[in-house]
Amino acid sequence: MSDPMNALAPEHRRLRIGDAWRDAASGATFAVENPATGKTIAEVADADVVDGLAALDAASTAMAEWAATPPRKRSELLTATYRALTERSEELARLITLEMGKPLAEARAEVAYGAEFFRWFAEEAVRVEGRYSVAPAGGYRILTVPKPVGPCVFVTPWNFPLAMGARKIAPALAAGCTTITKPAAQTPLTMLFLARVMEEVGVPPGVVNVLTTKRSGQVVSALLADSRTRKLSFTGSTEVGRVLLRQAADNVLRTSMELGGNAALIVCADADLDVALDGAMVAKMRNIGESCIAANRIYVEEPVREEFTARFAERMGALSVGHGLDDGVDVGALIDEASVAKIDELVADAVDRGARVLVGGERPAGPGHFYPPTVLVDVPEDARMLATEIFGPVAPIISFTSDDEVIAKANDTEHGLVGYVFTSDLQRALRFTEGLDTGMIGINRGLISDPSAPFGGVKQSGIGKEGSHEGIREYLDLTYAAIDLP
């Protein structure tokens, strides 16, 4: 087996600022850990405020020329990025598994998914349009001209280290914006790999800058306080999102926020249980459950509760746990010790309140940050896990007896990112679609993410949309000109 670290040479484990790969101004570095072993796999530069402002200098300097670059040229560079990522998918997938922990099959799927954002927005780059019309009262014309927002700051999470960055960088570049990306400290290597690929395909210096740092608060705050920054996009927890929104308000920045979730997955008695089981396994266990759109609460209608629960628990218990690069592994390591401890506490809390564990429920001994697929039943409404984003392979199952009851329970949360409904009744599906307070809904489907679809939530799950036709609009301002023409 080849060493995944060969995918990223030591000189490319530094900061990408302007046309250079450079050490942090302070010379500081930090360690990146393999969550399956707990061992250090690389040292990367640890940026501070000086480095952040240098990146903003580079992005600001490059902004005018990039905005003036013909849309077709921008499109071709995004297409070239898509092709390069596809050609190098295996080495990138191994790198993702090494620093994030997910099984290799899931890492390959992420590369395909992340690369697709570059292909989608390559097509959108040449379709940015304004309008020209006669004013209703006559006498003048209305002209609208879309323009790139300006330099953008991106803060991306560790759970999808390629896809979450691609979902922001691709539309920004398509619109004509320059970017500064601050990846999660747990998984910086993937974003550095992407920056290297984009350099190789010919994206001009200063358009894509990457800051790796353990001092996120200081660096990002400095960037948001600088008037040259015009846009912030963040994917992460609602708690951090609130802080960033307050900071962004000082300069009235355009913001896109994809925040936390507490997804309800609803299985109706009329559902095809085979379809529901397949969908529930995907919605719960994709990415080891470390996903904002993971099924957090599974509600099953009483007539099928016993059968669904037994079959679901059997499938969860059959999943193999281990190092993501090993053959046959279904469930890799969680990102860090804090994540394992949090899940362990949530399970213990539910059991203390009366829940029963059907499978899993105990962390294994040995190195690495592992937790087994776990199913709980008889979970009381006051269990913390029902009100908290679990972010791991734990599935609480709760019964329900009416649509009104389960809709009320599903909506009883500050979050509103996604919901899942399994039913064979079209009218019932439509009632759930209208009744659930979420930005997205999967009907008889556990996988909803697609670059061609608008991704985003309501309530405290976020602001704005990523992907689809709507995604590029987040990076465009609109100028209106009133033209006198009697």
Image (cartoon, helix red, strand yellow):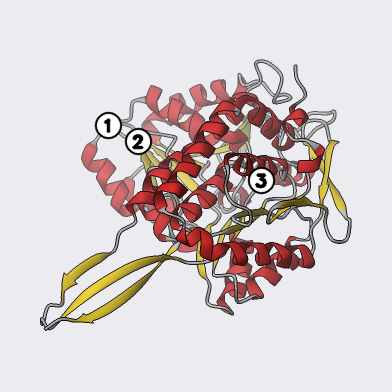
Q: Residues within 10 Å of mark 3 (few under 14, many from 20)?
A: many
Quadrant showing the N terminus: top right
Quadrant showing the C terminus: bottom left
The answer to whether residue 448 is left or right of residue 37 is: left
Amino acid type of the residue tagged 3 in the rendering? Trp
Judged from the image, the secondary structure of the residue bearing numbered disc 3 is: loop
Q: Residue at x 69, y 50 (%)?
A: 184
Amino acid type of the residue tagged 2 in the rendering? Cys
Foreground mark, 2 or 3, reads: 3
The answer to whether residue 122 is left or right of residue 292 is: left
Q: Residue at x 43, y 49 (%)?
A: 455
Residue 158: mark = 3
Q: Residue at x 31, y 48 (%)?
A: 433
Q: Residues within 10 Å of mark 1 (few under 14, many from 20)?
A: some
Judged from the image, the secondary structure of the residue bearing numbered disc 1 is: loop
Residue 268: mark = 2
Q: Measure how far apart labels 2 and 3 are at the Cα level.
A: 34 Å
Q: Position of residue 31 (x, y in %)?
A: 84, 45
